[in-house]
Amino acid sequence: MHQTIHPKILYFGTPVVLLSTLNEDGSANLAPMSSAWWLGQSCMLGMGMRSKTVENLLRERECVLNLPSADLVGAVDRLALTTGKNPVPGYKQNMTFQYIPDKFSHAGLTTAPSQDVRPPRVVECPVQLEGIVEKFHPFGAPDDFAMAIEVQIVRVHIDESILNTEKRHHIDADKWNPLIMSFCEFYGLGKNLHPSRLARVF
């Protein structure tokens, strides 16, 4: 039997992304987020428009989407309740956010230069997607302060440990264990249940 409920969030399960951008002084910012989905060579990001990351995206229009594996959950969690904004905005002070100027060091992560965009990649992340911002779309109710951001992926870097050994440009889904956010909790993937005839990739 189904029940009608009114959940505060609808995070049914999406990959965690560490989004790297550049601050106005050229330093790198790193923000964890999980409202992301891909179609073709584009990605749609959902973020709060008052964040430092969105401020950077509006100005620079470049980013890297770094996808951590499940074993990086500790590093990702160290970025929780941190902000690149100084002073910390009042609404974030109320949530005990802390200003961290170097989020890479704070999380114990390493930068690597990108090839087509200026923000750095996260060395430890098995998937690194360089992107150019195409469009910004206000999203939701006016008081939601949300933005949907369309990003064109221009270069893809994949750790060779998760590549299909027989198909060079394919990721082996049995080797890739992304960190997933489901209802504000971290999860990995379980075992493969059944092949999909609908989503076959050749």
Image: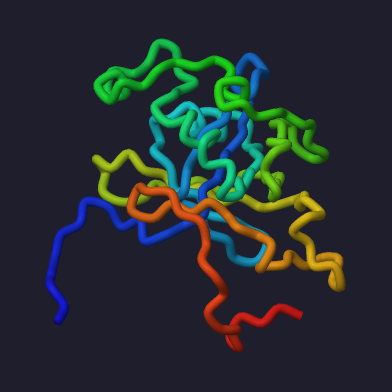
Q: Which residue is most to the top?
A: 87
Q: Is residue 193 above or below residue 26?
A: below
Instruction: Identify the image quadrant of the C terminus.
Output: bottom right
State left or right for residue 149 relative to residue 60. left
Rendering quarter of residue 144: top left
State left or right for residue 16 relative to residue 26. left
Give residue 185's position: percent from left, percent from top: 37, 48
Give residue 81's position: percent from left, percent from top: 39, 27
Q: Is residue 158 above or below residue 89?
A: below
State left or right for residue 60 relative to residue 117. left
Instruction: Identify the image quadrant of the N terminus.
Output: bottom left
The residue located at (45%, 54%) in the rendering is 187
The residue located at (64%, 38%) in the rendering is 63
Nearer-the-camera pick, 190 or 170? 190
Can I make out residue 89 in this image? yes
- Scheme of image coloration: rainbow
Give residue 125's position: percent from left, percent from top: 67, 43
Nearer-the-camera pick, 79 or 10? 79
Nearer-the-camera pick, 113 or 117? 113
Give residue 18's position: percent from left, percent from top: 57, 40
Rendering quarter of residue 122: top right
The residue located at (79%, 31%) in the rendering is 113
State left or right for residue 200 relative to residue 100. right
Q: Which residue is most to the bottom?
A: 197
Can I make out residue 58 in this image? no
Q: Is residue 107 above or below residue 151?
A: above
| Total tally of numbered discs in the picture | 0
Q: Is residue 131 above or below residue 60?
A: below
The residue located at (50%, 38%) in the rendering is 32
